[in-house]
Image (tube, rainbow, N blue to C red):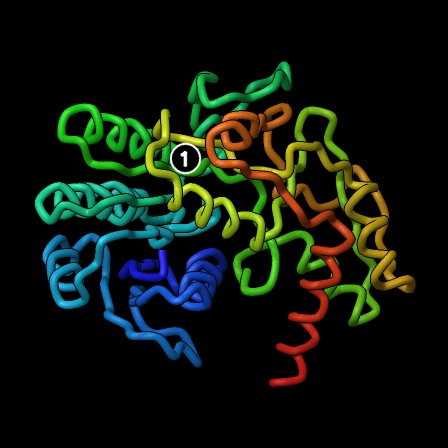
Amino acid sequence: MSKDSVLVTGVGGLIGAAVASRFAQRGCAVVGMDRSPPPGFKLPFMSHDLPDPHRWYQVIREHRVNKIVHAGGVSGPMLLNDSPNRIVQINLDGLTGLLEAARIEGIERIVGFSSVVAYGDHPDLSEITEKSWLNPSSVYGATKAAGDALVNAYYLSHGVDMVTFRVAGGYGPGRITPCLIRLLIEDALAGRKSLVCEDPHRTRQYIFVDDVVDAVVQAMGQPKLPQRTYNIGPGVLHTASDVINALKACLPNAQAEIDPAGMRWNSFGIGLLSIEAARRDFGFEPATDLVQGVQKTLEWVLQRQAQR
């Protein structure tokens, strides 16, 4: 893998930044992409305002890219709610341009990111596998479900080797979009009280960013993968009490309580997200428990605050 030239999109976000850093550490030639370079980004960079299709060919040819991690695009249903058509343009048109460039340029492997919200709500909270019914309730979720279908069709019709990850509640250093764990840490450091809702109709399933990056590296290194989409999550359900206990293990003075009127952030209307396919096909196994993840996120929050 050290001989690979890897394009990583979305390097200004949680997963893209961590993936770019990991592949660079492994000795790969890495080029980053986003609308603008993130502060302190030291690797080669090319701007790309999705869905511009021509930019894919330019970066692939100039940097002799043979593998791609596509973490760019609209990153959650909380963004661009007043511009649903823009969500479609960025996520679906952007993906179409990537798949077509990969077909023409002969890219060896692409790992991209779908989302757990592609499943929508399953009120019986049954276990969710990659074969479960997709029932997205947001335009963002619909673009992820449609994108997965497009990836599968390009593979079956044209041999484009792309896989996507339906990721659960990602968190950790670098996440600046709404995140319950980061907010609880910030409240605790400021001496504010936090209220968290435990909704019996919804679940929380937190996956630390480093574990997601591990999955990317493992999937990228496999010579052949038998399916196009994989669930990536912790393999367990987290209660509000689990989250609060992890917070207090790192910040004993934190004032956080369960309350029906509290925050419902980062919860999903589904049961356990099965990760058995990822375990079977590329050895994925989450390594970071909640306490470890909260501690690492705390250290990052403290570092950010010290730099202000």
Query: In the image, residue 53 lies at what x, y percent?
Result: 13, 53
Which quadrant of the figure contains the N terminus?
bottom left
**Does 207 sit above or below residue 13?**
above
Lateral position of residue 253 relative to residue 239, left or right: right
Q: Nearer the viewer, residue 200 or 252?
A: 252
Lateral position of residue 185 relative to residue 256, left or right: left
Most distant residue in the bottom direction: 307
- Residue at the spot x=84%, y=53% of the render? 256
**Does 8 sit above or below residue 208?**
below
Query: In the image, residue 143 lies at what x, y percent?
Result: 33, 36
- Residue at the spot x=37%, y=26% of the render? 227
Which quadrant of the figure contains the C terminus?
bottom right
Q: How many marks?
A: 1
**Does 18 sit above or below residue 157?**
below
- Residue at the spot x=62%, y=77% of the render? 304
Q: Nearer the viewer, residue 19 or 190?
A: 19
Residue kind at label 1, given as amino acid type: Gly
Q: Nearer the viewer, residue 258 or 66?
A: 66
The kind of secondary structure element at disc 1 is helix
Lateral position of residue 41 relative to residue 48, left or right: right
Q: Which residue is mark 1?
A: 141
- Residue at the spot x=74%, y=49% of the render? 290
Q: Quadrant of residue 284?
A: top right
Query: In the image, residue 242 lies at what x, y percent?
Result: 81, 42
Query: In the image, residue 89 lies at what x, y percent?
Result: 23, 46
Q: Residues within 10 Å of mark 1 (few under 14, many from 20)?
A: many
Q: Quadrant of residue 235?
A: top right
**Does 46 sit above or below residue 145?**
below
